[in-house]
Structure formats: C-alpha cells, structure tokens
Image (cartoon, rainbow, N blue to C red):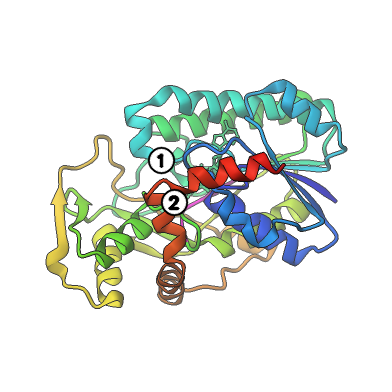
C-alpha cells in the first residue's frame, strides 16, 4: 500500500508516519508538508534514510504539486496538514481558511482524479462546539464551531462529506480530542507548561483554568487512524477519544507535581475570546465497529510525555531558539 500523508512533519503527522512504518514495514509513505512554523523535519530524523519514506516539501493548496505526487499511484490519502493553533486563528484567520478548507478541496480533487481507495480526513472534536456540564460529542452531534480554527476544520470536513455524496469518493472523517505526547510544538498546553516550569517561568492559564479537554495519547490516535484506513466504513465519521476529561488547571498542576515545581508558578490570565468550556468525546462507535482501544491511561501517558520532554530538551530548545529553521535550510540543500 502507498500512502500520501500530508502534514507529516507536524506533531501528530510525524508520530503517525513513525507508527505506520513500524506497524506496516511493507507500506510506502510519501510525506508532504509545507514546513510552516509548525513543521519540523527533526521529528523525522530517525527515518531520514528509510527506504519506504519519502519527504516532499509542498503546499497542499498547490494543485499542480499535489497532482504530480498523486501520479505516483497513491492508494490512500491521510490529511493531517492544517493550521492547528486556535490562538493563531484568532489573530490570522485567512491562512486557516486557505489551508484547512482550500487545501482539503485540492486534495479531494486529486484523490478523485486518481481514484484512491480511501481518503481520511483527520479532524477535531472542536467542530462540535462546546459542551455543558454533561453529555458527550457523538458522530451525530451537529457541527457548531466557535473559533476560526474549528470553523475552517468544519469547512474541510463538509467538503469531504460532499465529495463522498456527490462523487462517491471513498472517505472517512476522524474527529479526535486533544492529543499529547512526543514532538508536540511547544506552544501547545502540555509542552508549553513543561518548558516554562523547567525554567521557573510563570505558567499562564486562561480564565479560571476550569475549561475541560479530553486528552488522548498521540500513539493511541495513530492506532485508531490505522484501523479507520483498513476497516472504516466508507462515508462514515469516527470519533476518537481517550475518556480522559481533565480541567486545564489539573493538567498544569500535574506537570508541576511531576517536575517537583511549586503551584505558585501558575498565573491566571485573561480568557481567550470564544473559549469553549468543555469537550468530551464519545468514542463508542470507533471502539465497537473497529475494535479500537487506547493503550495509555492519562496517568501513564502524561508521565511518559514529561519524561520524553526531559530526555529531548535539545529538540524543543532548538525550536524555541529558532535553530530548527537553519536545519531546514541545510536539509534542503542536500535533497
Ligand atoms: P501541527 O500544527 O503540529 O502540524 C501541522 C502540519 O501541517 C505542520 O507540519 C505544517 O507544516 C503542515 N502544514 C500546514 N499548512 C500546510 C499546507 N498548506 N500544506 C502542507 N502542509 C501544511 O498540527 P497537529 O497537532 O499535528 O495536528 C494534525 C491534524 O490533527 C490537524 O489537521 C489538526 O486539525 C488535527 N487535530 C489535532 C489535535 C491536537 O490535539 N493536536 C486534535 C484534534 C485534531
């Protein structure tokens, strides 16, 4: 099987590429990524010369570049490429619409033209909006995105649905909760808190810190997508979640406790506009239909994650210092 993985130099995409090469040594992966600020080839260092992995720098909104890649005979497209940071979408919505909506449409057109056997759109529970104190998002929950990020992801998802209904394109959409684990860009909650706590900086927490997210260890997300590729019923949406609802402040306190740092480092800051209060995923359909089960509890996953950031300090300090930009330049001169 030959996969086109988009966004495979980002957090989840790179974990997915590493996971698939291990799980399916006979599969070929063409990894396409524009290397925005969030893409980092250092995530793929361990497979630099892997015979089954090819990295191509291209933008998913570039129809010609995508067409060229698809000519190689791609069986399955897995679309991770996205602008993914909610705070950035509030400052600069345009690029979110370009990549997350237009980019998805470009990929769908190419997938249709070259008759792929499956197109998997990796999406988010944020498209469902915010929950009250009770209830969970199911695949039937209406889409009610509240941020420019989630609205652009919902736009991409609706195009995927429409290409299935209109053209019979074999698609699946996956919607998952907050991921955590190795290689997450250090602007996101858990790595941000780890890196700041280690240098005894204040840890900024939005509002009262009681917003709830449902945490999923990234490898468990990858195993679910693997199952969706192979067993997902065409046209279906699959929710992926770890049943790990935690308040943001609980996450921050856990990080502090694990690192032996005082809670006095927490600093409550003005809330993000349109900040969704609670997300909670009902993954029953994915578990029953596909036999998926997460392997990591939050308690073990967070410990492993903190250990990874401690062991890979060079990885994230290089990002923070901008050194990884030079790494790109070097990488490219040799390709
Ligand atoms: P990320 O920001 O770490 O990675 C995104 C990758 O896409 C980067 O490597 C970036 O260079 C690339 N990219 C961006 N624009 C591109 C373009 N126009 N063309 C080609 N490549 C481009 O994001 P992530 O956290 O790994 O998320 C991956 C996917 O999973 C996204 O679609 C996101 O919406 C979804 N998701 C993420 C989470 C989470 O908790 N991180 C939760 C739910 C869903």
Q: Is residue 99 visible?
A: yes
Q: Which residues are magenta?
A: 173-180
- The residue at which mark 2 appears reads as 185
The secondary structure that most of the magenta stretch takes on is strand
Label pair 1/2, CB-CB below 8 angstroms? yes
Look at discs 1 and 2 and give the one toward the viewer.
2
Residue 85 is marked as 1
Label 2 SS = loop
CA distance separating discs 1 and 2: 10 Å
Q: Secondary structure at mark 1?
A: loop
Quadrant containing the C terminus in the rendered view: top right
Classify mark 2 as within 8 Å of ligand 1 or not, answering yes or no.
Answer: yes
Residue at (58% x, 29% y) in the render: 158
Q: Is residue 81 above or below residue 255?
A: above
Q: Nearer the viewer, residue 269 or 133?
A: 269
Which residue does the image show at 14% across and 52% down from the upper left? 268
The residue located at (70%, 57%) in the rendering is 226
**x, y percentage for residue 96?**
47, 28
For ligand 1, tell me if the residue under mark 1 lies within 8 Å.
yes
Quarter where residue 270 is shown = top left
- Where residue 272 appears, as percent x and y from the top left, is 24, 39
Is residue 168 among the parts visible in the rendering? no
Residue 64, percent across and down? Answer: 74, 21
Q: Earlier in the sequence, mark 1 or mark 2?
A: 1
Q: Residue at x 41, y 65 (%)?
A: 313
Estimate how packed mark 1 is, as few (under 14), some (14 to 19) or many (20 or more) residues with alpha carbons within 10 Å.
Answer: some
Q: Nearer the viewer, residue 9 or 285?
A: 9
x, y percent for residue 231: 76, 55
């Amino acid at each position: 099987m030959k996969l086109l993985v988009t966004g495979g130099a980002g957090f989840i995409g790179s974990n997915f590429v590493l996971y698939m090469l291990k799980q399916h040594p006979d599969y070929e992966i063409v990894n396409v990524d524009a290397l925005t600020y969030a893409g980092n080839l250092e995530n793929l260092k361990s497979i630099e010369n892997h015979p089954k992995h090819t990295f191509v720098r291209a933008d998913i909104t570039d129809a010609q570049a995508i067409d060229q890649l698809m000519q190689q005979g791609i069986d399955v497209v897995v679309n991770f490429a996205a602008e993914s940071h909610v705070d950035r979408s509030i400052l600069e919505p345009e690029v979110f619409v370009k990549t997350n909506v237009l980019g998805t449409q470009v990929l769908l057109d190419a997938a249709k033209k070259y008759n792929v056997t499956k197109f998997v759109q990796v999406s988010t529970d944020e498209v469902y909006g915010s929950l009250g104190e009770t209830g969970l998002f199911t695949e039937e929950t209406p889409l009610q995105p509240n941020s420019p990020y989630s609205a652009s992801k919902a736009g991409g998802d609706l195009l995927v649905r429409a290409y299935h209904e209109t053209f019979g394109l074999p698609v699946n959409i996956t919607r998952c909760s907050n991921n955590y684990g190795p290689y997450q860009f250090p602007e996101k909650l858990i790595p941000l808190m780890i890196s700041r706590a280690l240098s005894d900086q204040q840890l900024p927490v939005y509002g009262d810190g009681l917003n709830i997210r449902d945490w999923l260890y990234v490898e468990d997300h990858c195993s679910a997508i693997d199952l969706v590729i192979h067993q997902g019923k065409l046209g279906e949406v699959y929710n992926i979640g770890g049943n790990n609802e935690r308040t943001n402040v609980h996450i921050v306190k856990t990080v502090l406790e694990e690192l032996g740092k005082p809670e006095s480092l927490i600093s409550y800051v003005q809330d993000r506009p349109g900040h969704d209060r609670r997300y909670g995923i009902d993954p029953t359909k994915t578990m029953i239909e596909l036999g998926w089960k997460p392997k990591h509890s939050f308690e073990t996953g967070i410990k492993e994650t903190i250990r990874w950031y401690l062991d890979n300090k060079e990885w994230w300090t290089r990002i923070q210092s901008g050194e990884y930009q030079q790494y790109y330049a070097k990488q490219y001169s040799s390709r």
